[in-house]
């Protein structure tokens, strides 16, 4: 399984659940025992706790550093969230321990997502839900002419080189069916991330990362698996040039960017 920093998770999931309509099929206000698998820094865990006010909510992740960040973040008022270390394919709970088991952007990062879904089905007495992005269907518009095309090149190379199914999309339904789950709801939720004046500190930090090349360097290992050395170096140069153009536009209050990431929300019943 690939590992991520707390900063990366915060940056990529910011604003994800400003709208919670996609969670309606989970009937969260009726839940009493909820598990968030691969909880990371606890973004979804806290949302589940807010929407399931009477539930015992537990987050599990293999990364103890991310769990420490989740614990430090706290939770809804007067709620004591539990965070435990554990493997998604060998969950440390008896059968039927929860009435909802959920995950967000976990299956796409696992070498054997089917094994994880089987575990979800084992420890759930009712529903299993997966919220997984389809990275092959991301859309970008930008005031920097080169940005959308460059991001498309990087994304295609990354998907080819990453080694897990990061463009899972509707294939999550097949995993559910193979685990013996009956799919009761499947819908697509589009998470829109905007950068526009007035810029936040996070916006400016993201623009600076483009100009420095950090954004593409984060995925160097995966990209080099697919690209020849010369192609990677060229792409990084063009990326940094694009970032400098974005920085110049931002200084003038002219830079705008919209990224739309589709998430497939799949809900199954045991």
Image (cartoon, rainbow, N blue to C red):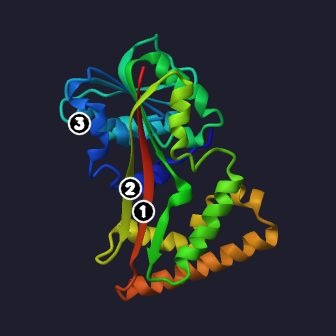
At x 46%, y 14%, the residue is: 93
Query: Dot 2, how many residues are within 10 Å of its Cα: few (below 14), some (14-19), or many (20+)?
Result: some
Is residue 74 in view from this perspective? no
Q: Which mark is residue 260?
A: 1
Does residue 164 sit above or below 59 in this rendering?
below
Q: Which mark is residue 50?
A: 3
Is residue 202 in view from this perspective? yes
x and y, in percent, of residue 134 in the image: 51, 52
Q: Looking at the image, is mark 3 or mark 1 nearer the viewer? A: 1
At x 27%, y 26%, the residue is: 80
Query: Dot 3, how many residues are within 10 Å of its Cα: few (below 14), some (14-19), or many (20+)?
Result: some
Asked if the residue under mark 1 is in contact with the one under mark 2, i.e. CB atoms within 8 Å, the reply is yes
Work out whether residue 263 or residue 9 is closer to the camera in this orientation and state it. 263
Q: Which residue is mark 2?
A: 190
Marks 3 and 1, how far apart at CA: 25 Å
* First reached walking from the N terminus: tag 3 or tag 1: 3
Marks 2 and 1, how far apart at CA: 6 Å
**Quarter of the rendering containing residue 224:** bottom right
Judged from the image, the secondary structure of the residue bearing numbered disc 3 is helix
Does residue 118 sit above or below 40 in this rendering?
above
Q: Residue furthest top?
A: 94
């Amino acid at each position: 399984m690939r590992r991520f920093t707390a900063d990366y998770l915060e940056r990529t999931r910011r604003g994800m659940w400003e709208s919670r309509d996609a969670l309606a099929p989970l009937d969260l206000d009726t839940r009493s025992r909820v598990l968030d698998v691969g909880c990371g820094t606890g973004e979804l865990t806290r949302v589940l706790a807010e929407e399931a006010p009477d539930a015992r909510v537990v987050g599990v992740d293999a990364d103890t550093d991310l769990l420490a960040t989740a614990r430090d973040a706290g939770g809804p008022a007067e709620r004591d969230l539990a965070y435990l270390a554990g493997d998604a394919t060998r969950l440390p709970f008896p059968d039927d321990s929860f009435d909802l088991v959920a995950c967000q952007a976990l299956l796409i990062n696992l070498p054997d997502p089917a094994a994880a879904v089987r575990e979800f089905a084992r420890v759930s007495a009712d529903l299993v839900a997966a919220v997984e992005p389809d990275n092959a269907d991301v859309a970008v518009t930008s005031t920097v002419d080169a940005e959308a095309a460059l991001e498309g090149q990087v994304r295609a190379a990354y998907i080819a080189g990453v080694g897990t199914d990061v463009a899972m999309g509707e294939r999550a339904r097949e995993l559910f069916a193979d685990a013996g789950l009956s799919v009761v709801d499947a819908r697509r939720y589009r998470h829109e991330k905007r950068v526009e004046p007035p810029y936040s500190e996070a916006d400016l930090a993201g623009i600076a990362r483009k100009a420095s090349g950090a954004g593409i360097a984060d995925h160097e290992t995966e990209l080099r698996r697919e690209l020849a050395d010369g192609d990677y170096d060229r792409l990084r140069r063009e990326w940094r040039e694009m970032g400098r153009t974005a920085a110049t536009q931002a200084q003038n209050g002219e830079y705008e960017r919209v990224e739309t990431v589709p998430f497939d929300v799949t809900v199954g019943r045991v």
